[in-house]
Amino acid sequence: MERDSRASLRLTETADSGNTGGAAVLRVAQAFVNLADTMVDDFDLTEFLHMLVDHCVDLLEVDAAGVLLSDQRGGIRMAAASSEKAQLLEVFAAETDGGPCVECVRTGNVVTSTDLPADAERWPRYAAAADACGFRAVHALPMRLRRDVIGALSLLNTRPDGMHATSTQLGQALADVATIGILQQRSIDHSAVVTEQLQTALNSRVIIEQAKGMLAAHSGTLTPDEAFSALRGYARAHHHRLSDLARQVIAGTADVSAITAHGAP
């Protein structure tokens, strides 16, 4: 998008200006630009979340990253992972409903284990699965906007670690930006659904108006309002959707005489 190109140009100019760590600044800033840009017609949530975990591996002191999201039924599902082993661990956590990442989703709080074997008593099944996948430490960061927790970002390491506070803070910032983008897109999708439903209702109204006019003309005695009552009465009596029956009237496939009889005095 043109906006992205302008932003990338400004970031590149900043990185090339000779500032210390300019390249790192560019990568961090570009990650935020990418994660903030969800206002596109072809937004793909799966691709968006994979971009998030890839940025985490690129920018933070982690070997892998994954995302668990809560669904509308209260369950938790694996949504993205930066590697096959991370994906296996995230799927296991979701299916067994346990471990630091699931706990993070449920509580909305950061959950950390810098040495999973040492925390095996707390999460025995998860710790064993993590060990099988080669991971020894995890930092689970909530994907949360105020009280709305939609998931967790898992930062995984293959060795016991004390991940630097700066990396943890940056990881949370990335999770926060991604959360805002997802919730914004959900709002857009909801608006689109509502708009589509309203348009469908408007289209049906036009069809019904046409059908009742045809019924009134066919009967020669019914007013449009009486024709509508007849149409609705017949639909109810025969368990038809009103709009479907109206379409049949317009198409000439309905028993018009039987319908107008419902409007007779």
Image: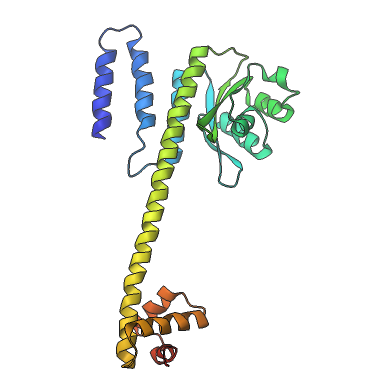
Q: Is residue 118 visible in this depiction of the protein?
A: yes
Of 205 and 222, the residue lying toward us:
222
Residue depicted at 32% across the width and 41% down the height: 40
- Direction from residue 240 to residue 110 in the image, left or right: right
Colour style of the rendered protein structure: rainbow
- Direction from residue 220 to residue 151 in the image, left or right: right
Of 149 and 102, the residue lying toward us:
149
Which percent across, then down, holds residue 160?
63, 14
- Direction from residue 130 to residue 7 in the image, left or right: left
Which residue is outermost to the front? 265
Q: Is residue 61 visible in this depiction of the protein?
A: no
Which percent across, then down, holds residue 2?
23, 33
Residue depicted at 46% across the width and 19% down the height: 170
Residue depicted at 62% across the width and 31% down the height: 107
Quarter of the picture containing the C terminus is bottom left
Residue depicted at 37% across the width and 57% down the height: 196
Which percent across, then down, holds residue 228?
38, 81
Quarter of the picture containing the N terminus is top left
Which percent across, then down, holds residue 52?
45, 29
Of 88 and 140, the residue lying toward us:
140
- Direction from residue 208 to residue 139 in the image, left or right: right
Looking at the rendered structure, the number of numbered marks drawn on it comes to 0
